Amino acid sequence: MTSKLDLVKAAYNAHLWTESPLIHVGRPNIGCTEALLSRIRGLCERKWLSNDGPLVQEFEQRVAEISNVKHCVAMCNATVALEIAIRAAGLTGEVIVPSYTFAATAHALQWQEITPVFCDIDPITHNIDSAKVERLITPKTSGIIGVHVWGRGCDVSSLVEIARRRNLKLMFDAAHAFGNTHTGQPIGGFGLAEVFSFHATKFVNCAEGGAVVTNNDELAAKMRLMRNFGFSGYDNVIYVGTNGKMNELSAAMGLTSLESMEEFKAVNRMNYNSYRACFANFPGISLIDYDLAEVNNFQYVVLDVDEATCPISRDQLIQVLHSQNILARRYFFPGVHRMEPYKSHYPNANLLLPVTERVTSRVVVLPTGTSVGAADIDRIGRIIRDALTKSLYETLRLPRNIEIGKSFVEIEY
């Protein structure tokens, strides 16, 4: 017997406009193809593909300069970078983190048998709520990991004060925040260390890559050992380690991307402003704000859907957009605390995370980057306007709550 959900999905699939181009969140910025190919030809001629090659060294130097820090330790991806930074910093027991983040932030702890303790977020910034951190500290707490969500800096000064007073180690997941500033200072030098992502979805990317930046000499030296099996020189292992190295091909992509970094920022900001103008008078929806006094990469266009005043739900809006091949995303849904193994370990965590619960039900991330232009944004605006006036929504007749299917796009946050 055909279920109601099957009928809904069939109706949804029947409205896919396959002749319309796919526009999705996280489409990679490439930069100058000729510059990339020139770097690849050079590394092929050198036959030096990994093991701290010249392109990786140059990439580390450039990232350190942009972040105004002493050390950048490039890694194969940001998840491994988090794991190595956590281990090198000596975190143990419990570490306080937000649940409103990509799963890797918690997994990097859990993987090393460290318990992530989920803290609620600020309703405006979507960053960890520093006012709620202290009540979560126990004798087992060894540190705090803040996340600069959407590239907007955490309440660093309050977190630093708590960490100093309670003798805790403070680190930051800065996956969204490369090239940004907080209180006028480049993000990268806060806390003991900060971790950047250079995944394909990031505005500056290495196809796959990450890095830890720090001003701590001892920590940097330890992480360099740990990312290369603990080798110190030839045939001399002096520390336990793993294989977390960035390869030369990834560094070639990263350096090429860095050369176009300002262009990417300019395109992102122009797209953001176009979206803002487009949605100026839409009922029940608004874009999150960026502090124009700070440098920001504008790589996320984040729509907040207030169901109390919006004619349709967030998930209905997502379905309408997907039906028109606009592959918008629910970011950090449903919250790490509702993912395994955490939802089994802490089945009632939602009671302590009311803001996180609310934000995960409201947020839509829209496509931007160099593959999105003014005509695309105008089309997206028209689709949303139609949905809000129910012309398209009534055609699709979607229920208010429906499972959002997995899109065949880059899925890392």
Image: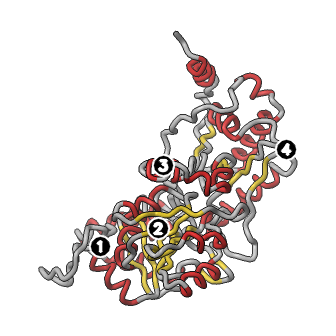
Residue at (63% x, 39% y) in the render: 326
Q: Position of residue 63 (x, y in %)?
A: 48, 77
How many other residues sit within 10 Å of disc 1, few (<14), some (14-19) or many (≥20)? many
- Look at mark 3 in the image and give the residue it sits on: 343
Q: Is residue 361 depicted above or below 296 in this figure?
A: above
Task: Indicate the position of residue 64 as horizontal and vertical percent values.
Answer: 47, 82
- The residue wearing badge 4 is 283
Tell me the mark number nearer the camera, choosing from 3 and 2.
3
Secondary element at tag 2: helix
* Mark 3 or 2, nearer chain start: 2
Name which of mark 2 and mark 4 comes first in the sequence. 2
Q: Secondary structure at mark 3?
A: helix
Residue 169 in the image: above or below residue 329: below
Element at label 4:
loop
Q: Mark 1 to mark 2: distance in Å?
A: 24 Å
Tell which circle, 4 or 3, labels the residue nearer the N-terminal end: 4
Asked whether residue 340 is in view, the answer is yes
Q: Residues within 10 Å of mark 2 (few under 14, many from 20)?
A: many
